[in-house]
Amino acid sequence: MITHVSRPDLPTLQPTRPEATLFAEPPTVTRGPAPEQPPRVYDSRRDQSPSLVLLVIIATLGILAYAGFLLDPASRGDWLPYAMVITAELVLISQALLSMWTILSGTYDPRDFAFHNAKGALFRPRDVRRDGLSDDPARWPMYLETAGNPSAQASVDVFITTYGESVEAIRKTVTAAVAMHGEHLTWILDDGRSDEVRDLAGELGARYVRRLSSGGAKAGNVNHALAISKGQFFAIFDADFVPKPEFLIETVPFFSDEHVAFVQTPQTYGNLHNVISRGAGYMQSVFYRFIQPGRNRFNAAFCVGTNVIFRRSAIDEVGGIYTDSKSEDVWTSLMLHEAGWRTIYIPMVLAVGDAPDTVEAYTKQQLRWATGGFEILLSHNPLSRKRRLTLDQRVQYLVTAAFYLSGLCPLLLLLVPPLEIYFELRPMNLSTTVVTWMLYYAGFYVMQIVLAFYTMGSFRWETLMLATASFPIYVAALFNVITGKEQRWSATGDRSRASSPFNFMIAQVLFFVFLLLTSAVAISRDLDNGVLTLATAWNVTNTVILGSFVGAAMREARLLKRESRRARVGSMRPAATRTDALTTGVTA
C-alpha cells in the first residue's frame, strides 16, 4: 500500500536574514530572531598547515623505517609469530602510507568560481518579495544556471528513510528537513510501516510512502520513492540525522556542473555520551576531515548513505541505487565513477546525527560496512582491467575495499604474546634488544598518536579499544562474503529490538578470558625469573584494552536491565489502576 499525504502550505516560519551571498539585494526583514550562525566549515588550508605536512612526512619516514626493520633478515625470530607480525604490520603499513598520501592531497577545494557564481544566483530576491515569501525561506524557488539552460528552476526531493527508529528522532529530522531553505518536497520513506510515523508526516507537512515489502533494504526504499517522485535532485537523510537549514544552499550550486552526480557532506555526531559512541564517532572523524577531502583530487569521493544529494539523471543512468549489497552507498559511488560521473565531498557540517551507542548498533554497522568492502575486494576488484576507472580511482577504491583487512590484524597481534609465553616462540631475534624494537615501533605507532593529538586535540583511547575489539566483526564479514551468506538489514538507529550486548560479543569475551589467564601465567613466570618480559607487558596491555570493552558492555547491560524493569513497571501500572477502580466501584 502506498499512502500519500498531500503537502499543505508550510506554516509561517520565523524570518531569518539570509546570507548576503545568497542575494544581490537581500529582502528586508525587520523582525525575528538573530541570524543563525553559518554552518561549520573545516578549512582545508588550516588542516593542511605546514606543521601537519611536516608531521605526515615524519610519520611516513617512521613507517618506512619500521617496515625496513621488520623485513631485515637479522631481525627475524621464529617463523610462526614472525609471519603473523609481518602479515599484520604490512597490511597496517600499506594502509597508513596510502592514507598519508591521500591526506597530503587534501588541499583541493571543489568550491570554485562556478560554484560561487551558481550560489549567488540560486535565489531571485525580487520574485521572492513579489510572491510574499520573504519570511518563508523553505518555499524560495531555487534556480540553477547551467550551460544548457541558464534559467532553469531546480526541483528537489528530500528523502528521509526510516526503519524502526523512534518517533521522537524522526520528528526532529522531518521538522528540520521541511524547514530547509530552498523550495523542496520532503518525503518519509517508512519501511518500518508505522502508523505513528504516517500520522507524523501529515502533521509536519511531509509526504509519506509505505512499501508492500522491504526488498532491496534501504536502496530499494529509495528506488521505490524515485519511481513516484519527479525532482531533478534528491537528498537522502537517515532518520536520526537532522539537517541544517543551509544544506541545499551549500550543495545544490555544485550541480551547475552537469558532470556532478552527487555532493556528499560529513557524518557528524551529537550523542558522544558513552564509550561506544565516542569510539565510533572518533574513528570516523579523521576520515571525514582528512581522507574524504583528499579523494576530491582523484574524483574518488564516495557516498556514505546519508547527508548526500544526488542528480536523478546520474542515478537513472546506472540503474538506480545499487541493491545487490547492504553497502549500497559505496557500490553506487563505484558504479557512478565507472560511468564517468564526477563526485564531490565538502567538509562542511550540514547535518548532525547519532553515532551507534550500543554494542549491537556498532556491531551491525561495522558488519554492514565491512561486508561491502570485502564484496568489492573479492567480486569487483578495482585493479581489474574490466573496471572503467582512472589509476587514482583504482588505488582509492582498493584502499577502501582493503581497509577492513586492517581490522583483522589485531587478531594476529593478540595471539603473538601467548605464543612466546606458552611456547617460547618469538617474532624477533633474541639479539634484537627491547630498546631497539621500541625505537622502530615508536616511529610507526607513536607518530600516529602524535598526529591524532595534532588533528583531534587528544588521543582517543576509545578508538584504540574499538579498533582492537572489532576483529570478530570483520572475520564474520569476510566469512559472509566468501560463503555468500546473506546479511539481514538493520538500521543503526533501530531501537525496537534491543538485545543484551553480550549476544554480539561472545568472541571478545572468550578472548578476554584467555588473555586474562595468559597474563596471570606470564606474571607468575616473570616473578619466578625476576625479570619482566616484553611479551608479558604486551599481553597485559591487550588484556586491559579488551577488558575495557567488556566493562563497557557490562555497563550497557545494567542500563538495559534497568530500562526494561522500568518499562515493565510502567506497563503494569495502568492495569493495577483499573483493578483498583473496579474493586472500589469507581469508573473512569
Image: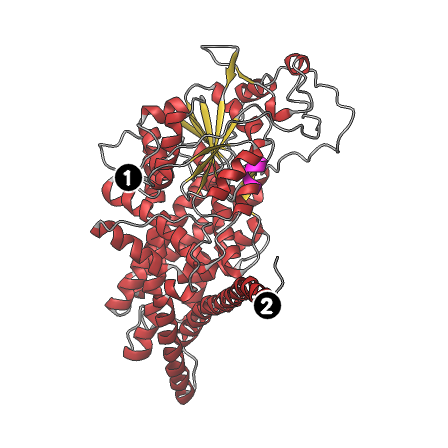
**Label 2 belongs to which residue?**
580
Give the amino acid type for the residue marked by disc 1 in the picture: Asp
Up-down relation of residue 194 to residue 520 (above or below) = above
For the residue pair 546 and 399, the one nearer the viewer reads as: 546
Instruction: From the top left corner, tell me how far across and down residue 162 is, in percent.
Output: 45, 42
Q: Is residue 45 visible?
A: no
Q: Is residue 69 visible?
A: yes
Q: Which residues are magenta?
A: 172-176
**Label 1 belongs to which residue?**
324
Instruction: From the top left corner, tell me how far across and down residue 410 is, in percent.
Output: 36, 62
Distance in Å between CA atoms under marks 1 and 2: 56 Å
* Image point (37%, 47%), residue name: 369
Farthest residue in the front direction? 585
* Image quadrant assignment for residue 379: top left
Up-down relation of residue 266 to residue 275 (above or below) = above
Q: Secondary structure at mark 1?
A: loop
Give the amino acid type for the residue marked by disc 2 in the picture: Asp
Q: Main secondary structure of the magenta part?
A: helix
* Image point (53%, 10%), residue name: 151
Q: Is residue 549 left or right of residue 382?
A: right
For the residue pair 566 and 309, the one nearer the viewer reads as: 566
